[in-house]
């Protein structure tokens, strides 16, 4: 077999975040709150709430007249207009915002109206006015600071520009309509931070420029210190790097032809002797032969854990026996997570959010696997391989190695010790003992659960504390309804998610600096028959955290919730990281529901759920504003959707980025955005999304929901939604994006970007399909317009849409289909690049 070291092929990205250790020791007065507003945006202007003709708040002009908000492209979707009359001086408008350093992303939608004028459409500078990047338009071309043209810029057409800047190396990439057009461009000046966005019309001929959906944000730092982080997206294509799933989302490839000698690869990393997490997305393109998906080894070749593809199974091979973990489908990606306790020579295996343990019938506290080689005392390399013989392929993506943040901070109160006396036997009720420890833990301290199964009803946390559930512990929810008092009875008042949820197992209200972590398990014990009924508010969530600041939920396995599992409601500064969710019991078992929260970072989570997997909801005036979801997996949604905004959509979903996410086995749609209860949606971006086995890839709906579930509120707007590098396999239906006529007015979607969206749809429609009936206000599930009433396109159905940019999209059908790739109904200003 050919062996190849990947040091020359792969880049190690050591990203500063939390260190491998928290820096705290049990008993030390150290507390680490969540990063404030981890997913917050420093700038976000869509102009839709400003009256036409009025000055835009915060925007300053460098000449008389100033910019003004215009009813363009119409009275609902407004923009900033900057006009230079003939003979006037150059005019430039700028908007200052809090300085951002590190990796900074700035985006705007721009349109110029005239060929003859010269424009600065996108200029970024520091607080001191040092210009980092300039993009202009001159005579139908985008130009750089030196006047060099690099892409067409047609007057009268909207373009979405995004710059990704690194203030450390002072270089930036530029993306236009989802296509990277400039790479590693040097800053014009030595700006150390980005704090100003400018645009204007230069001296010369008269001209008008429109700017819309302007955002700026710092890329949130990882919540762990990576020892190894490889995504392969910046590696050149070749024998070992492939454009799979897409050119923007590349992966490592080990392959050989039939009868070949095989291929292997080794990836070294800094030696780890404690607890360490190894995670990767893996895939095979054949269901024959044996292939190493992920081996964790020491320098001498000793194997701690060996995860392999064997035929149609993913297995742990201990050297003597291949222990089946899960069945494997051809060309399907799997997220494998290994948590290795090197001193104990034990490890845990998670696949797509589900934990696979050695057989232990009836055990609530599941055992761990033993290392394959008992002599392994450190781990420092990963091994991948395809054996000789039949043709074989292994693909690897999103490869990570990191130690979890693994030390309980502050004074530690062990609930099994006096005076608390929790039993941890899984039989006797430990609620009173654990709650007493919670009530008594001092500021910055930890309530510590270890070495048992702790049966409990509702627990109420307070500010400045950690609830630590150790790796060898399970917090087991009681099935006694009396153990879960209504959250609404709290004297301070708590929200309750639109009346759909008002009880919880782990709860917090009106707190700050709360952590829930430790590496253990929270089991909702949700199989109680009375809890398997649709609707009802008596069932407790696993976590119901409300009206709080700086909340961390990380390094946990949660399973079998009685209803929605993790529910943060009105939280400012939220981190959910390294959490696996397995909650597939019928019914209404959502995975993660983030409600009306700001500054949210969700990373490295894996969810398998009965209902919606990762869902944002809005019921209060706060709305959802500023969130990032990345490097995560939806392993299954038995009856619903993958990543969803809504259905509860009363106020707003603004400024959210979802990137590097795998979504598979969802009964409805992979990506859903709903504004049906009066909400506004602006600036949602979905990038590098892999979809496998879904009803449809994309579903967006603006409308007015009526009936028992609806608010009957008039629609507001959906503006600035981008889908970039979305790869969908095994889809039943095309994507659908639609507004709705309400009160004689067509309520439309605006500024939709479809860039490099690849869909493989079943197809088989042999007669052209008529335009389907409009949305009629019922529950707006994403299976609207399916089956016999499907849409008249095999790729995208666009209904009541104003301003679509479609670039590089493809659709294939497995059965012959007469429908066109795109069908338009009341869809305006569609441009194809």
Image (spheres, rainbow, N blue to C red):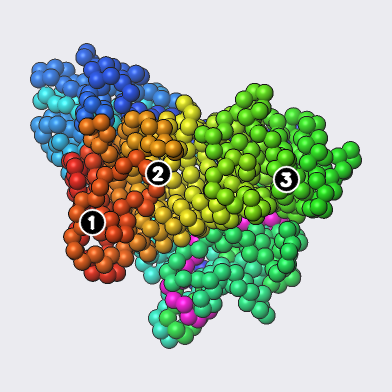
Specify the farthest residue to the right. Answer: 418
| Pointer 1 residue | 793
- Of marks 2 and 1, the one in the foreground: 2
| Pointer 3 residue | 480
Q: Is residue 578 left or right of residue 730?
A: right
Q: Earlier in the sequence, mark 1 or mark 3?
A: 3
Residue 415 visible here: yes
Give coordinates of residue 10: x percent, y percent.
Answer: 47, 60
Would you call the spot at circle 1 few (<14 residues within 10 Å), some (14-19), or many (20 or more)?
many
- Which residue corresponds to the image point at 70% horizontal and 31% vertical from the top-left? 462
164 relative to 233, above or below: above
Helix, strand or loop under label 1: loop
Which is nearer the eye, 171 or 500? 500
Which is nearer the eye, 489 or 342? 489
Secondary structure mostly seen in the magenta stretch? strand
Which is nearer the eye, 670 or 23? 670
CA distance separating discs 1 and 3: 51 Å
- Magenta stretch in the rendered image: 273-291
CA distance separating discs 2 and 1: 23 Å
- Of marks 1 and 3, the one in the foreground: 3
Residue 181 visible here: no
- Which residue corresponds to the image point at 80% horizontal and 31% vertical from the top-left? 440
588 relative to 76, above or below: below
Helix, strand or loop under label 2: loop
- Which residue corresponds to the image point at 66% horizontal and 49% vertical from the top-left? 524
Would you call the spot at circle 2 few (<14 residues within 10 Å), some (14-19), or many (20 or more)?
some
How many numbered discs? 3
596 relative to 129, above or below: below
| Pointer 2 residue | 779
- Which residue corresponds to the image point at 57% horizontal and 45% vertical from the top-left? 564
């Amino acid at each position: 077999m050919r062996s190849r070291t990947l040091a020359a092929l792969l880049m190690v990205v050591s990203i500063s975040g939390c260190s491998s250790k928290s820096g705290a020791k049990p008993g030390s007065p150290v507390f680490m709150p969540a990063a404030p507003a981890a997913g917050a945006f420093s700038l976000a202007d869509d102009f839709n709430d400003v009256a036409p003709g009025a000055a835009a708040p915060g925007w300053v002009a460098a000449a008389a007249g100033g910019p003004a908000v215009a009813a363009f492209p119409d009275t609902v979707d407004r923009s900033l207009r900057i006009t230079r009359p003939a003979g006037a001086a150059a005019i430039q408008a700028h908007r200052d915002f809090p300085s951002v350093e590190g990796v900074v992303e700035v985006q705007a939608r721009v349109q110029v109206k005239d060929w003859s004028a010269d424009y600065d459409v996108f200029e970024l500078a520091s607080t001191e006015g040092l210009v980092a990047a300039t993009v202009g338009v001159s005579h139908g071309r985008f130009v750089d600071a030196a006047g060099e043209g690099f892409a067409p810029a047609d007057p009268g057409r909207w373009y979405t520009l995004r710059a990704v800047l690194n203030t450390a190396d002072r270089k930036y990439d530029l993306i236009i309509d989802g296509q990277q057009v400039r790479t590693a461009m040097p800053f014009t000046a030595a700006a150390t931070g980005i704090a100003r966005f400018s645009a204007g019309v230069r001296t010369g001929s008269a001209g008008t420029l429109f700017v819309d959906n302007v955002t700026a944000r710092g890329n949130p730092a990882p919540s762990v210190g990576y020892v190894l982080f490889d995504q392969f997206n910046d590696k050149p294509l070749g024998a070992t790097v492939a454009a799979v799933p897409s050119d923007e989302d590349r992966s490592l490839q080990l392959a050989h032809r039939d009868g070949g000698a095989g291929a292997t690869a080794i990836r070294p990393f800094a030696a780890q002797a404690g607890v360490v997490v190894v995670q990767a997305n893996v895939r095979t393109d054949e269901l024959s032969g044996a292939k190493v998906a992920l081996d964790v080894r020491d320098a001498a070749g000793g194997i701690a854990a060996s995860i392999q593809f064997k035929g149609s199974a993913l297995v742990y091979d201990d050297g003597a026996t291949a222990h089946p973990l899960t069945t494997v489908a051809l060309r399907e990606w799997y997220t494998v997570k290994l948590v290795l306790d090197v001193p104990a020579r034990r490890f845990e295996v998670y696949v797509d959010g589900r934990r696979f343990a050695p057989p232990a019938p009836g055990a609530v506290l599941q055992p761990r696997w033993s290392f394959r080689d008992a002599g392994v005392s450190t781990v420092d390399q990963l091994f991948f391989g395809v054996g000789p013989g039949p043709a074989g392929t292994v693909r690897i993506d999103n490869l990570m190695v990191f130690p979890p943040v693994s030390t309980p901070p502050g004074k530690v109160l062990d609930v099994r010790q006096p005076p608390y006396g929790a039993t941890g036997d899984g039989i006797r009720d430990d609620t009173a003992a654990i709650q007493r420890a919670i009530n008594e833990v001092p500021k910055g301290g930890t309530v510590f659960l270890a070495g048992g199964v702790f049966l409990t009803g509702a627990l109420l946390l307070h500010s400045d504390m950690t609830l630590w559930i150790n790796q060898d512990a399970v917090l087991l929810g009681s099935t006694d309804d009396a153990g879960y008092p209504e959250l609404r009875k709290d004297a301070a008042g708590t929200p309750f998610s639109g009346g759909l949820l008002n009880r919880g197992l782990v709860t917090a209200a009106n707190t700050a600096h709360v952590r829930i972590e430790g590496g253990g398990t929270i089991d909702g014990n949700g199989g109680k028959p009375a809890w398997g009924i649709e609707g009802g508010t008596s069932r407790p969530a696993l976590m119901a955290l409300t009206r709080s600041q700086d909340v961390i939920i990380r390094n946990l396995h949660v399973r079998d919730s009685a209803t929605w599992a993790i529910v943060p409601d009105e939280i400012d500064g939220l981190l959910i990281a390294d959490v696996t969710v397995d909650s597939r019991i019928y019914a209404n078992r959502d995975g993660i529901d983030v409600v009306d929260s700001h500054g949210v970072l969700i990373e490295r989570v894996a969810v398998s759920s009965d209902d919606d997997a990762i869902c944002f909801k809005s019921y209060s005036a706060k709305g959802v504003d500023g969130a990032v979801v990345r490097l995560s997996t939806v392993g299954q949604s038995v009856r619903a959707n993958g990543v969803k905004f809504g259905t509860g959509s009363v106020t707003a979903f603004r400024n959210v980025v979802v990137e590097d996410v795998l979504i598979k086995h969802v009964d409805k749609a992979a990506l859903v955005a709903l504004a049906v209860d009066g909400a506004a949606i602006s600036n949602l971006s979905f990038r590098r999304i892999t979809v496998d086995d879904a009803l449809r890839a994309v579903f967006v709906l603006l409308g007015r929901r009526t009936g028992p579930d609806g608010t009957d509120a008039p629609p507001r707007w959906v503006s600035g939604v981008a889908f970039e590098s979305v790869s969908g396999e095994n889809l039943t239906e095309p994507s659908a994006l639609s507004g709705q006529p309400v009160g004689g007015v067509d309520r439309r979607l605006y500024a939709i970007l479809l860039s490099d969206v690849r869909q493989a749809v079943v197809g088989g429609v042999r007669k052209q399909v008529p335009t389907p009936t409009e949305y009629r206000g019922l529950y707006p599930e994403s299976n609207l317009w399916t089956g016999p009433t499907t849409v008249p396109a095999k790729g995208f159905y666009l209904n009541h849409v104003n301003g679509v940019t479609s670039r590089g999209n493809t659709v294939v059908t497995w059965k012959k289909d007469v429908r066109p790739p795109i069908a338009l109904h009341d869809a305006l200003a569609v441009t194809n690049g």
